[in-house]
Image: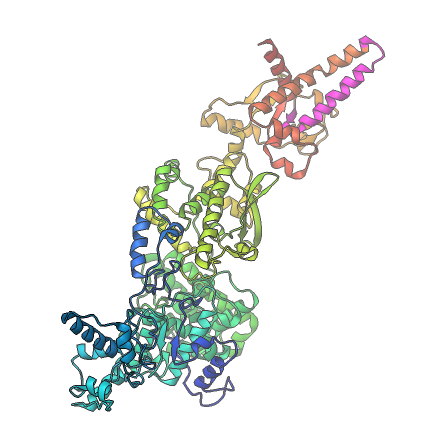
C-alpha cells in the first residue's frame, strides 16, 4: 500500500516524452541549486535557526531560548502555564506580557570543550567535555574528602586535551562523538539501554591510557557485524533544536525532502511542520529503505509522518507531472491551471472512472472549466466527478464489455442508468460507485439530492463532448448523450430563527457561554454578533480585513467583500454597539501581531491583516479563522443551549424577513443583503401565513379624500383586526391606480385606460387619493392659493378663494397628522420630485382620501 492512489511516473523516464530532463533526481538537484533556494536547507545535516520564519523552533514567549513543543507555540513549562492562564480567563497577549523566559538545561548546539577544541562540551556549568568533567568531579570530590579545596582554574591549567573522536558512528547522526567509543552521548546511552548489540567495549583503564599516557584506544567487539548493523539502522534522535539529519537516505528521497521544505517555506498558508516531525519522516524512510516518498508505506509510519508525506507528494506532483502526464495518470491538478482552492487538495483523483473514454471526457471538461471560467469552489468539480463515477460503475456492471467499447453504447444504456439511479433514490439504496474523497471504500446512499448531483454531472460532461464534436470523433451514440436528464435544482431554504430561539441566541448569559468556547480569544462572539446585526454571509464576516470599519458623514460603516456575487469593497451601515466591539477586536489583533513579530504592523500590513486571524498556518497574519472552526464552536454552543438544531446562516434569513416586515421591499432586501437577483431575495424572505402585499396593507393607514361622499373615513387603522377583515380589506387596497396631479386616481375604468367621465376634476372627486409622497406638492399648492388670496382686488374675492381651498387645507393638515402617526412625516417632507423607485416605498404606498383628511382635521380641532 502506498501513500497515494495517484500513480507516480517511473523514477527514470525511459524516453523524454514530456520533459527534456527525465531523471527526477537531476531535476530536483537543479531546483535545489537554484539561487532562490534557501541555503539553510541544502546540506544533508540541516540546522534550522530557532527564529526561522517557517521552521523556527523557539518558544514564543519573548526571550525564552527553549524549544517549543511540537504543534504548540511554547515550551513544555510555558504550555502548562498558558493553559492555567487561559482557564482563568486570560488571553494570549496578556500571557506573553507576563510570562518570564526560562533558561535551558541542555545545549541546542554544544560548544567545544574549554580544554579540547575538537570535542563538544557536556557540562554547562564548567564547559568541559564528558571525560574532563568526570575527571574534575572525581578529583574535586577526593580533595573535599581530604578536607582540601581544589581550585578549578589551577586544575584547568594542568588539564591535557583529548584527541577528537570524529563523527558519531551512527550513520544517521550528524553529531560529533564525545566518547572514545565513537558515539555522541545520547546514542551511547541508547546503545547501553538496548543491551550493547555486538558487544563493543573499551580496554580497561582506557581513561588513564588516553589522558596520561597518550596511547591510542582500540575498540573491540564480540560481533562487529551486529555492531555495525546497529550503527547503520539506528535513527537519528529527534530533538526540538532545529536539527534535521538526512544522512543515510537514498539520494532521491533526500532531494525530495529538501526541495519540498524549500517550496513549503514559500507558501503563506503552509501548515506547521515541526522539524522534529520531519526527522521522524526521514527515519521512517530510512527504516523502510525507500527510493522515493511515493514508495513509503503509511501503515508502517507514525501518524504525523504519513500526514506530512502525503502533502509532500502533492507538492512533488507539480514538478513530476505536466498536464498531459496527469491525464494519462488518471488525475487532474488544479494548480497546473493556476487555480488553488482553500483548504482543499489541488489534485482530483479520476481513477474511479474505469472507462478511459469517459475519464478523458471528464478530464477535458474539468480542464475547460479551470481554463475558461474556474468555479468559485471545488464542489462543482467534485459533483461532476461523482456523477461520472456512478455512470462508470453502472456501465462496468451492465454494459457489454464493461462499457469500455464506446461504440456499443446506445440510448437504452443511458435510460437503464437513469432508471437504476431513480430506483435507488426512491428506496434509499446504496450507489454503485465509490467516490469518497478521503479514500474510503464504502459507497454512499443515493438520495434525491444526490440524484440531482449525479444527473447534472453526467449531463455536463456528455453535452460538452457533443458540442465540441468529441463524441462523434470517439464514436459515442448521440442518443446516449441526449437521454441524460437534467438534474434540476431541488434545494430547500432555511427558516428564520423562531422568537424563543432568537432570544436565547441573544441573551447575555448565553453569549458568555459562547465566548467561553473561544479559548484563544480569536473573536468567536464578535463574529456571531456581526452576523446577527448585519445579515452577512458567514465568509463575508469571518474573512474581513483589519481595516473594515469607517465612518462617512458620522455614520459607522462596515466594509467587506461579497465574493459570492462579485461585489468587492461594499459598505453597509452598522449599529454603534457593533462598531465599538469591532474596534476593540482591531486593537487586539494589532497587539497580537506586535507580540508575534516584535513590532506594530505597517500601513500596508494593516490593509492585508485579517480581523479574526487564525492560530496556525498564519505567519503573516493575513489568514482568517476557518468556517469549520466557527461552525464547530457554534454547533457546540447551540447543543449546550438545548434549543434544537439551528445554524448560523439562519440569521441572514431572519434579518431578511424582519426587513420585509418593517417596510422594506424586495429591492431593498436584495440590495442590502447583496443578493444576485430579486428571486434570491424572495428565497431569503419568509412571511408565514401572510402574503407580502397584505402585510404592507396591515401596516398602512388609509383615509378617504376630500371629494368622497364620506370624507375622513378611516380605511385601516392601528386597531387589531381579524384575519377575515384583513383579507377583505386587502381586496380593496391592492387594486390598481394611476398617477394624477397631486395624488392617485383609483377609478377602475380610468385605470384601465378609459376617459374620465368627470372631465378630470380630480381634486373634487371621491376616487382621488392622497399619499405621503404628495405632501410637498400640496404644501406648495397651499402657498400658491394663499398668495392668490392676498393679491385679490377686494376682500370678497379673497374670502371666496380661502373658502374654495379650505377643504384641501384641512386635508393637508390631516395628511400630516396621519403620516406623523405612522412615523413617515419626516420622510414625506424630504421627498421633492417623483422618481420611479419611490413608488416602492411606504410613503407612496399609503394613500388618504382628501375629504376624509379634511373632516378628520376639523374633528381634531373640536376635540
The stretch in magenta equals: 767-796
How far from the left and from the top, in percent, is residue 137? 21, 73
Q: Main secondary structure of the magenta part?
A: helix
Question: Count the marks: how many?
Answer: 0
The residue nearer to you, when weighing 415 against 701, is: 701
How far from the left and from the top, in percent, is residue 146? 14, 72
Q: Is residue 820 magenta?
A: no
Q: Is residue 793 magenta?
A: yes
Q: Could you tell me if residue 409 is visible in this image? A: no
Residue 552, by quadrant, is top right
How far from the left and from the top, in percent, is residue 275? 36, 71
Report the side of 244 relative to 591 (left or right).
left
How far from the left and from the top, in percent, is residue 585? 46, 47
> Which residue ends up furthest to the left in the rendered image?
145
Which residue lies at the image location 64% right of the left edge and 36% below the top edge? Answer: 838
Reply above or below: 762 against 325.
above
- Locate the C terminus and report the quarter of the image it occupies: top right
The residue nearer to you, when weighing 585 against 843, is: 585
The residue nearer to you, when weighing 431 against 104, is: 104
Reply above or below: 810 against 222.
above
Which residue lies at the image location 46% right of the left edge and 23% below the top edge? Answer: 720
Report the side of 710 relative to 654 (left or right).
right
Q: Could you tell me if residue 609 is visible in this image? A: yes
Amino acid at each position: 500500500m502506498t501513500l497515494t492512489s495517484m500513480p507516480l511516473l517511473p523514477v527514470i523516464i525511459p524516453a523524454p516524452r514530456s520533459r527534456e530532463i527525465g531523471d527526477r533526481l537531476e531535476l530536483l538537484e537543479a531546483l535545489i541549486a537554484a539561487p532562490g533556494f534557501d541555503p539553510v536547507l541544502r546540506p544533508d545535516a540541516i540546522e534550522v535557526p530557532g527564529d526561522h520564519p517557517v521552521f523556527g523552533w523557539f518558544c514564543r514567549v519573548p526571550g525564552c531560548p527553549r524549544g517549543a513543543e511540537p504543534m504548540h507555540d511554547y515550551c513544555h513549562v510555558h504550555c502548562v502555564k498558558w493553559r492555567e492562564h487561559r482557564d482563568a480567563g486570560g488571553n494570549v497577549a496578556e500571557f506573553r506580557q507576563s510570562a518570564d523566559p526560562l533558561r535551558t538545561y541542555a545545549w541546542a548546539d554544544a560548544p567545544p570543550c574549554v580544554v579540547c577544541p575538537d570535542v563538544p562540551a557536556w557540562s554547562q556549568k564548567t564547559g568541559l567535555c564528558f571525560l574532563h568533567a568526570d575527571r574534575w568531579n572525581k578529583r574535586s570530590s577526593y580533595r573535599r574528602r581530604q578536607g582540601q579545596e581544589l581550585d578549578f582554574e589551577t586544575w584547568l591549567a594542568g588539564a591535557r586535551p583529548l584527541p577528537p573522536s570524529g563523527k558519531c558512528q551512527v550513520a544517521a547522526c550528524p553529531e560529533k562523538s564525545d566518547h572514545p567509543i565513537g558515539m555522541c552521548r545520547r546514542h551511547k546511552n541508547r546503545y547501553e539501554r538496548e543491551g550493547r548489540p555486538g558487544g563493543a567495549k573499551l580496554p580497561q583503564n582506557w581513561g588513564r591510557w588516553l589522558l596520561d599516557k597518550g596511547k591510542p584506544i582500540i575498540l573491540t567487539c564480540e560481533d562487529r557485524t551486529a555492531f555495525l548493523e546497529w550503527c547503520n539502522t539506528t535513527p537519528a534522535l529527534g530533538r526540538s533544536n532545529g536539527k534535521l539529519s538526512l544522512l543515510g537516505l537514498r539520494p532521491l528521497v533526500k532531494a525530495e525532502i529538501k526541495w519540498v521544505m524549500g517550496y513549503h517555506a514559500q507558501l503563506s498558508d503552509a501548515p506547521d511542520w515541526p522539524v522534529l516531525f520531519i526527522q521522524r519522516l526521514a527515519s521512517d524512510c530510512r527504516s523502510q529503505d525507500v527510493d522515493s516518498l511515493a514508495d513509503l508505506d503509511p501503515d508502517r509510519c507514525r501518524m504525523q509522518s504519513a500526514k506530512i508525506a502525503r502533502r509532500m507528494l502533492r507538492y512533488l506532483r507539480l514538478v513530476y507531472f505536466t498536464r498531459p502526464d496527469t491525464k494519462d495518470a488518471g488525475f487532474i491538478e488544479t494548480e497546473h491551471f493556476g487555480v488553488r482552492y482553500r483548504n482543499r487538495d489541488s489534485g482530483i483523483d479520476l481513477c474511479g472512472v474505469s472507462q478511459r473514454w469517459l475519464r478523458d471526457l471528464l478530464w477535458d471538461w474539468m480542464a475547460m472549466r479551470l481554463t475558461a471560467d474556474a468555479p468559485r469552489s471545488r464542489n462543482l468539480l467534485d459533483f461532476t466527478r461523482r456523477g461520472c463515477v456512478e455512470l462508470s460503475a453502472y456501465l462496468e456492471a451492465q454494459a457489454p464489455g464493461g462499457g469500455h467499447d464506446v461504440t456499443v453504447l446506445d440510448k437504452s444504456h443511458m435510460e437503464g442508468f437513469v432508471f437504476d439511479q431513480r430506483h435507488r433514490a426512491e428506496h434509499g439504496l446504496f450507489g454503485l460507485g465509490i467516490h469518497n474523497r478521503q479514500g474510503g471504500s464504502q459507497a454512499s446512499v443515493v438520495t434525491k439530492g444526490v440524484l440531482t448531483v449525479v444527473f447534472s454531472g453526467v449531463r455536463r460532461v456528455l453535452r460538452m463532448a457533443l458540442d465540441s464534436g468529441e463524441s462523434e470523433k470517439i464514436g459515442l451514440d448521440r442518443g446516449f448523450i441526449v437521454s441524460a436528464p437534467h438534474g434540476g435544482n431541488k434545494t430547500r431554504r432555511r427558516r428564520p430563527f423562531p422568537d424563543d430561539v432568537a432570544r436565547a441566541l441573544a441573551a447575555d448569559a448565553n453569549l458568555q457561554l459562547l465566548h467561553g468556547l473561544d479559548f484563544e480569544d480569536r473573536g468567536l462572539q464578535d463574529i456571531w454578533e456581526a452576523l446577527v446585526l448585519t445579515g452577512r454571509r458567514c465568509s463575508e464576516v469571518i474573512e474581513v480585513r483589519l481595516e473594515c470599519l469607517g465612518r462617512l458623514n458620522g455614520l459607522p460603516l462596515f466594509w467587506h467583500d461579497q465574493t459570492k456575487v462579485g461585489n468587492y469593497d461594499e459598505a453597509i451601515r452598522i449599529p454603534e454597539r457593533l462598531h465599538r466591539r469591532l474596534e476593540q477586536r482591531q486593537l487586539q489583533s494589532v497587539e497580537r501581531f506586535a507580540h508575534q513579530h516584535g513590532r506594530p504592523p505597517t500601513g500596508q500590513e494593516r490593509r492585508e491583516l485579517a480581523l479574526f486571524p487564525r492560530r496556525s498556518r498564519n505567519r503573516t497574519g493575513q489568514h482568517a479563522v476557518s468556517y469549520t472552526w466557527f461552525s464547530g464552536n457554534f454547533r457546540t454552543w447551540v447543543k449546550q443551549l438545548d434549543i434544537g438544531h439551528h445554524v448560523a446562516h439562519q440569521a441572514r434569513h431572519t434579518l431578511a424577513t424582519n426587513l420585509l416586515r418593517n417596510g422594506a421591499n424586495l429591492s431593498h432586501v436584495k440590495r442590502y443583503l447583496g443578493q444576485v437577483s430579486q428571486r434570491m431575495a424572495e428565497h431569503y424572505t419568509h412571511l408565514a401565513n401572510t402574503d407580502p402585499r397584505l402585510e404592507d396593507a396591515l401596516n398602512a393607514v388609509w383615509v378617504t379624500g376630500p371629494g368622497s361622499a364620506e370624507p375622513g373615513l378611516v380605511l385601516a387603522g392601528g386597531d387589531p383586526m381579524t384575519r377575515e377583515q384583513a383579507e377583505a380589506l386587502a381586496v380593496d387596497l391592492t387594486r390598481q391606480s394611476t398617477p394624477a396631479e397631486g395624488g392617485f386616481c383609483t377609478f377602475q375604468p380610468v385605470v384601465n385606460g378609459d376617459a374620465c367621465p368627470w372631465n378630470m376634476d380630480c381634486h373634487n372627486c371621491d376616487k382621488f387619493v392622497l399619499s405621503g409622497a404628495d405632501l410637498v406638492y400640496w404644501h406648495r399648492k397651499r402657498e400658491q392659493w394663499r398668495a392668490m388670496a392676498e393679491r385679490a382686488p377686494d376682500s370678497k374675492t379673497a374670502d371666496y378663494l380661502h373658502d374654495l381651498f379650505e377643504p384641501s387645507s384641512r386635508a393637508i393638515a390631516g395628511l400630516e397628522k396621519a403620516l406623523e402617526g405612522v412615523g413617515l412625516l419626516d420622510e414625506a417632507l424630504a421627498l421633492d420630485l417623483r422618481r420611479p423607485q419611490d413608488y416602492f416605498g411606504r410613503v407612496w404606498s399609503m394613500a388618504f382620501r382628501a375629504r376624509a383628511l379634511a373632516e378628520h382635521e376639523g374633528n381634531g380641532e373640536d376635540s
